[in-house]
Image: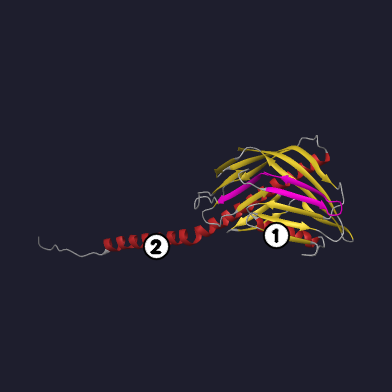
Amino acid sequence: MSGQFFRVSDSGISTVLSAVLLLGLFVSVVTVFNVHYVPEWKADAERAHMDEVYDDMSRLKTGGDLIALSTSVDPDTITSLSVPITMGGGYIPIVGASKSSGSLSINDNICSMQIVASNSTSGNTYNFNMDNRGSIIYSSNNNYYVDQVLIYENGALLLSQNNRSIMKLSPSIYIRHLCGNNYSVNVNSISLRGDTRSVSSSGTQDVRLDSQSSVWLFRNNESLTDVTISVNSNYPSSWAEYFNTSAFSAGLTYSTDFTVVEGDDYARISISPAGHLELYLKESTIEISTGIF
């Protein structure tokens, strides 16, 4: 075969090498995208969801206050409302389709309140033991953002994160300065009744509140010298801080007019100013139930 010869060509190798390099570049870009950007975006999305849950629980607490107020004005009135709780979030189309989840516990946490009022002059003492106040607790199960717990108990909304808690919305417990060394202690204790239940999901959970009753337990029946309020809770530091803030805001002096004690599962404030005290104590009962949208 005269006149024929073979030539060496690198065009095939160049094509394969280019494809390999492009594939490697694509894998690198996808890896950097998933490692550095997606977690940050998901964390931001889950943080936004936690803000949404906080708004939901705030509406739940406000709804409880409104129901307690309506039954206080007219004990025969019937008030109901439903508050949706967004259980899961963090959804990002295409890049992060998975959602976080959360759990909602109804009356699964024991909390209570005790109030002792006395008149050292007459020797009269009044004890009010209000057990099983009930609670509504949302616990997040986030994949990227720090987990949080929101607690509605004794009429207050608390936030717990990394074993620390803070009271976000205060209960209907406050101290008022009247005149001189005279003060009033005002308490509307909210009791949540209903079956114990716990549910976990990434959807929307509906919490229904129905008014039951509102009764006066003590309504300035007698001028007092001492009032002690004790709250049993898994978050005593939040209650202790609230008691301190309330007393200072009313103009009371620590150790002279009041003291606050914090234990492992309780917080207690003892009020005994030089003047006299008035006590207004009411108990409002709300029925709670749940359902899924």
The answer to whether residue 81 is above or below residue 116 is: above
Residue 224 on image: x %, y %: 85, 53
Mark 2 — residue? 25
Q: Earlier in the sequence, mark 2 or mark 1?
A: 2
- What amino acid is labelled 1 in the image? Val
Quarter of the rendering containing residue 108: top right
Q: Amino acid at mark 2?
A: Leu
- Region of the chain picked out in magenta, as a range: 112-140
Q: Is residue 68 left or right of residue 197?
A: right
Residue 52, visible in the rendered structure = no
For mark 1, what is the residue?
261
Is mark 2 in CB contact (under 8 Å) with mark 1?
no
Q: Does the segment drawn in magenta span residue 116?
A: yes
Question: Chief secondary structure of the magenta span?
Answer: strand
Q: Look at the image and tell me whether residue 285 can be seen.
A: yes
Q: Nearer the viewer, residue 70 or 155?
A: 155
Of helix, strand and loop, which one carries label 1?
strand
